[in-house]
Image: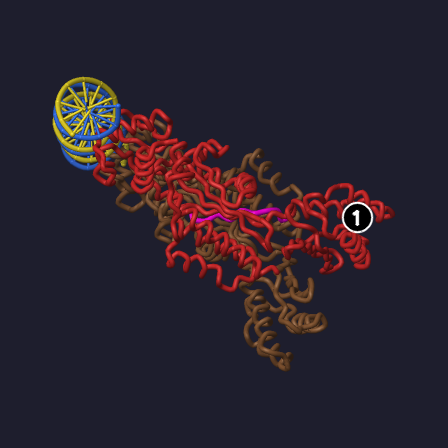
Chain colours: A red, B brown, C yellow, D blue
Amino acid sequence: MLSGRKRAILKAIVSDYIQRAEPVGSRTLARRYNLGISPATIRNEMADLGEMGYLEQPHTSAGRIPSYKGYRYFVDSLMEAEQLSPADEERLSRALQQRLSKIDAVFSEASRVLSEVSQYVSLILTPIFGQQTFQQLRLVPLDSQFVVVLMVTDTGLVQNRVMEVPPGVSAAELDQIAQVFNKHLKGMSLEDLNSSFLQELYSVFSRRNRALQEFLADLITGFTFGEGEKVFLGGTTNILKQPEFNDVEKVRNLLQILEERDHLCRLLMDMASEDIAIKIGEENECLQMKDCSIVTASYEINGRRMGTIGILGPTRMDYARVISVVEYMQKLLSKTLGDILL
Amino acid sequence: MLSGRKRAILKAIVSDYIQRAEPVGSRTLARRYNLGISPATIRNEMADLGEMGYLEQPHTSAGRIPSYKGYRYFVDSLMEAEQLSPADEERLSRALQQRLSKIDAVFSEASRVLSEVSQYVSLILTPIFGQQTFQQLRLVPLDSQFVVVLMVTDTGLVQNRVMEVPPGVSAAELDQIAQVFNKHLKGMSLEDLNSSFLQELYSVFSRRNRALQEFLADLITGFTFGEGEKVFLGGTTNILKQPEFNDVEKVRNLLQILEERDHLCRLLMDMASEDIAIKIGEENECLQMKDCSIVTASYEINGRRMGTIGILGPTRMDYARVISVVEYMQKLLSKTLGDILL
DNA sequence: GTTAGCACTCTCTCCCGAAGAGTGCTAACA
DNA sequence: TGTTAGCACTCTTCGGGAGAGAGTGCTAAC
């Protein structure tokens, strides 16, 4: 455990650095914070903290900056929770209070306002289909050639797409297919939907040709991979305001990651297991993100954890504030989605 | 008109600058290109071209760079059409040859490969609904509370969303609504779909309450603004490789524009009126894009111009190459979409 | 009309020195 | 023994030349 004085110094250093983005020295620290001790004493303590791995020195005779370990300690046991200002709460709420008919519009608005209020990059993972169970399937023929496939999950999400109907399959037969699905799959987790069911289907429709079999296979893969999960991204340009991203090379590295939606998707899914998750710098598996931190929260639909919202910024981000923003949005989103879907 | 020699010199300068991104001087020009004249003569000609507004000088005693007018002249009458390499054609085709069930997947793949091959930023505007006519409406009730609204256009695009059914409206009544729509609107341009029809609808269902009226109004606005047009963006990071974007401030300006999807949408719609459109530097209304050029082409679905693909790069972009890429993708996309939708 | 020569201009880079900030060590102090 | 003042030292940053390099425009000759 760190002594009270070391804790106070570490806290002051991290806070100061978060605010000003510049290495902080003993003299400045003594001047700016009322620690009641002289720069010399602070220097001694700083040397200790440096040896213990909480602080780093960009070079001899620059001030100290927090190491990853320093941020972690700060977040875990020094930082004070911050109450979101009423103005910010207002901004967040209002964005979701508009009448947003499509669920995607909700996510897109949420991501926009999240990045605006936080001034960092916002990420939103749409509901994970694997977490839901099959409720019903509808096959709505548009004409003799195309059919609209509607799949409804237990949480009320509707997945839809247009498919080509194999030639010679009648509307009655489509109905029959839907019936088999609805009878056999109701309540089954979409994750578990595997090929054994497909075999069963084949046998039911065995008299039929290869085209139909392909159609059925496509139908099922569409459920699991179909629309899939998407990631909404907002405020990418905010990151460019941060002094640590004054280097175009760094910017490019980060933006490249943000362009790989699959990667982000996996990242957010991994973090979905916790209510609030914080990854600081090196804790990110991805090397290119070692200068960044991510704070995520999982939103719920009807009490079930369904997806994740997150904010990405430099390791030097204002954790207390970001956490309060994310938490507020988490509640807001859970409520809004519940209202729309239930 | 410019003399043959001036044309040759201008062409050499623009080509060289496009390739190397550095002001080009008379001596270098004479060395690199076999123009058969001495640097001194070139200098005279360059001075003329400068006075005529085709060239600019970053400062005295640097070489010349093309002005906006210089690029324009180059594009209009100096540039030689470039044949896309078989390898590139292959890459573009293959991306769209995958089985892509959802139309959005086609656009997303197209935008990805477009940016990869061009090494600039790619933009794709999804089909403009206003250009299409109403074909049919389906209202598929999921349960007593929600209904899936399916609207099919004459080009085979399906727009869908989930809406809440006003309490007390039966399935039969929904059917009736759909029938009225299908009877009155078939063949009508979605753009023209206005409130006069809504009045008519009200009178048909006049016995009904306010909730139903709101439902009907929402239904119609959904057609025109509903899903709306989307812009797919790819290869944003490519722009960062360009030396002209070594300045973070410039990058931020551009990325900010690219984040405003509505703005991009309008931009691409404006350019949709031509088969191939090229906007160079200052020709862009948007001030922040004065250092950029956009090359667009409109793709067709069943012979009707429906949307736009484009490539955005620095004014110093390789126009010949970009044009050939865009043209190729235009044909590819028109074909692919025709196949999927028809 | 074209070219060679030349003086001149402007940028870029490298280097140097001064300023500033901060450290670590030592010695004195409570 | 912990704390503090003092001091020499280190390292970065910034500004000011000096020199190199590239290119221009003008003039005079071909």
Q: Is residue A304 above or below residue A90?
A: above
Q: Nearer the viewer, residue C24 or A130?
A: C24
| Dot 1: chain letter | A
Residue B120 in percent (x, y) is at: 46, 41
Q: Residues within 10 Å of mark 1 (few under 14, many from 20)?
A: some
Left or right, A73 with reference to B340: left
Q: Residue at x 46, y 47 (%)?
A: A122
Kind of residue at badge 1? Leu
Is residue A37 on the magenta stretch? Answer: no
Left or right, B298 with reference to A204: left
Q: Residue at x 22, y 32 (%)?
A: A39
Residue A38 in percent (x, y) is at: 21, 33
Which portion, as a residue range, is magenta?
Answer: A227-235
The answer to whether residue B268 is visible is no
Residue that numbered label 1 is attached to: A212
Q: Where is residue B221, by image quadrant?
A: bottom right
Residue A324 in percent (x, y) is at: 42, 50
Q: Nearer the viewer, residue B168 or B78?
A: B168
Q: Is residue B209 above or below residue A229?
A: below
Left or right, B13 with reference to D21: right
Q: Nearer the viewer, residue C3 or B317?
A: B317
Quarter of the picture holding the C terminus of chain A: bottom right
Query: Which residue occupies the extreme right position in the image?
Result: A207
Residue B156 in percent (x, y) is at: 65, 58
Is residue A229 on the magenta stretch? Answer: yes
